[in-house]
Image: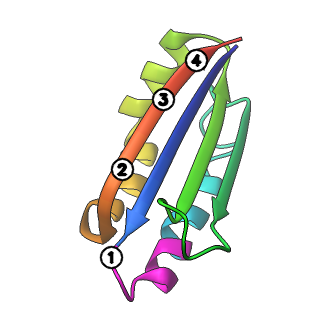
Amino acid sequence: MITHIVMWKFKEGTRKQAKEFLDGLQALDGVIPQIRSVETRLSCNPANTFDALLIVTFDSMEDLQAYQQDPRHLAAGALHKELRENRAAMDYES
């Protein structure tokens, strides 16, 4: 199992758009066949380093790569480039 984690720091005043962005990523669950689970969250603590979190699980690195190249993922993810100040990602195997 591969877990893909992404965190974002969004620009000031973009919380509504950030929520729409996360909703778009969450909506990929059940649409992109390689996804095993998706969780998105907005931080409730303004002192956190990051404002939002995505956790997606896959069966393999190949499935993660297919997801990252899927046009539906690319379309859903396009908005974050306008909104973000910072992004961090990590993948791990369990």
Q: Residue at x 58, y 53 (%)?
A: 53
63 vs 82: above or below: above
Q: Secondary structure at mark 2?
A: strand
Nearer the observer, 47 or 78:
47
Residue corresponding to mark 1:
11
Q: Residue type at mark 3: give it.
A: Met
Return the residue nearer the eye: 65 or 83: 83
Cα separation, mark 4 vs mark 3, equals: 7 Å
Quarter-of-image position of residue 79 = bottom left
Q: Tell me the residue at 55%/64% (across/down).
A: 48
Tell me the distance, in whole angstroms, between the alpha carbons under discs 3 and 1: 22 Å
Label 4 sits on a secondary structure element that is strand
Position of residue 73 measured from the top left corner of the image (x, y, whole percent): 44, 45
Dot 1 amino acid type: Lys
Which residue matches tag 2? 87
Q: Secondary structure at mark 3?
A: strand
Q: Earlier in the sequence, mark 2 or mark 4?
A: 2
Q: Is residue 78 visible from the viewing direction of this image?
A: no
